[in-house]
Image (tube, grey):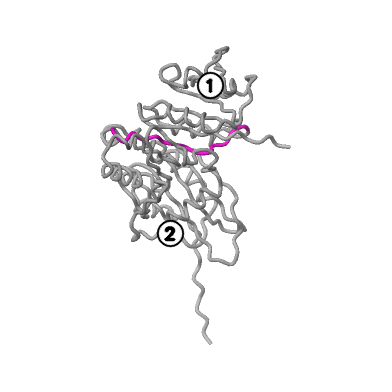
């Protein structure tokens, strides 16, 4: 029987946004879980010092049964060190450094076969600072990239800004990351927000977000629910601060060999500008849909639902920097299986 994989929540956000406050909130909110926590900035303003009981072998035992360590240069070694410790855990939290590009850590869980056998990404969470976000976003590409890569975004410190300004920031976030769930918070309060066990990297979640992006009626105004989650009005092309989300819909089938070869090369040569790709793909001579997901230069396919009597289609969403929609659409169309036009039959 295969051992159940440990879910991983990756927490990003710029310096001072409230990432560590979120960590402490998660520990308090979920006493039923045994967390392992990897902190990039451990020992500065990290996990509540009162929780630390001992520190043998760079693994810090916490009084609530969780364990914590700092992120070493060798990420794989850090994970192996945690797995080899005497303390057992059932959820891994990773807090990245504020100035980091989180895609390299995400990529390790997508492309690393040995890591995938023991871990699975649950979601990427970004904590945005309502006070400084706009200024940082203009100066730092990493801030925009953290938002673009996130599955769930907390606009924190909204108590420190005017409500109208907070609303404008929420709209900006929704433009950069149109498929993410977005919440307004203060002091990283997540009492009414489900941060863990969202399965954002699951086949079903990728399928649903792709369908929503490629089919939503853009004429509907933005709504704000009582839970303070922002429902995003998504266009097939969304642009803000050079971050673009481009959605494409195609009828018919892709040629599996052409698609695989082209996508492999496209992601490799554009890994610094293409942050994430999601999609539902139909291939010729296959009975099932395929769910496509890529981060950085790595990608994977999962078998989806079986095609029934409906017309075959493919939907793909590219999130990245300075994407040429025209050129990308032209290339994708060349990967489709060309159907021959039947000759007319004369009596």
Residue at x 33% of width, y 48% of height: 324
Residue at x 30% of width, y 32% of height: 140
Q: Secondary structure at mark 1?
A: strand
Q: Which one is nearer the viewer's eye here, 242 or 97?
A: 97
Q: Residue 293 in the image: x percent, y percent?
A: 50, 45
Highlighted magenta segment, given as a residue range = 118-131
Q: Residue 203 in the image: x percent, y percent?
A: 56, 48
Q: Is residue 2 left or right of residue 26?
A: right
Q: Nearer the viewer, mark 1 or mark 2?
A: 1
Please identify the quarter of the rendering in which residue 275 is found. Answer: top left
Q: Which mark is residue 1?
A: none
Membership of 4 in magenta stretch? no
**Which image quadrant: the N terminus?**
top right
Please identify the quarter of the rendering in which residue 219 is found. Answer: bottom left
User: Which residue is denoted by mark 2 in the rendering?
Assistant: 215
User: Which residue is denoted by mark 1 in the rendering?
Assistant: 68
């Amino acid at each position: 029987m295969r051992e159940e994989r440990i879910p991983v929540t990756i927490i990003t956000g710029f310096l001072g946004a409230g990432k560590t406050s979120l960590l402490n909130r998660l520990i308090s909110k979920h006493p039923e879980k045994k967390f392992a926590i990897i902190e990039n900035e451990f020992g500065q303003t990290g996990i509540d010092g009162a929780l630390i009981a001992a520190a043998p072998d760079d693994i810090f035992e916490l009084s609530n049964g969780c364990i914590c360590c700092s992120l070493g240069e060798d990420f794989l070694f850090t994970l192996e060190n945690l797995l080899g410790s005497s303390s057992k855990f059932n959820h891994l939290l990773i807090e990245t450094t504020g100035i980091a590009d989180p895609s390299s850590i995400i990529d390790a869980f997508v492309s690393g076969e040995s890591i995938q056998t023991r871990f699975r990404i649950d979601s990427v969470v970004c904590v945005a600072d309502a006070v400084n976000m706009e200024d940082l976003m203009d100066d730092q590409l990493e801030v925009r990239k953290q938002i673009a890569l996130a599955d769930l975004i907390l606009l924190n410190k909204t108590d420190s800004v005017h409500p109208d300004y907070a609303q404008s920031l929420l709209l900006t976030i929704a433009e950069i990351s149109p498929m993410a769930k977005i919440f307004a918070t203060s002091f990283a309060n997540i009492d009414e927000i489900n941060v863990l066990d969202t399965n954002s990297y699951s086949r079903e979640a990728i399928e649903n977000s792709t369908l929503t992006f490629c089919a939503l009626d853009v004429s509907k105004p933005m709504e704000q629910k009582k839970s303070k989650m922002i429902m995003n009005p998504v266009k097939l092309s969304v642009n803000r601060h050079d971050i673009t989300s481009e959605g494409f819909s195609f009828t018919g089938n892709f040629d599996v060999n052409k698609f695989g070869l082209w996508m492999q090369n496209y992601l490799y040569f554009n890994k610094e500008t293409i942050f994430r790709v999601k999609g539902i793909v139909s291939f010729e001579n296959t009975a099932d849909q395929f769910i496509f997901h890529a981060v950085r230069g790595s990608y994977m396919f999962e078998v989806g639902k079986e095609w029934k009597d409906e017309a075959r289609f493919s939907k793909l969403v590219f999130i990245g920097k300075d994407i040429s929609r025209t050129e990308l659409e032209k290339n994708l169309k060349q990967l489709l299986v060309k159907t021959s036009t039947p000759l007319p039959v004369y009596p």
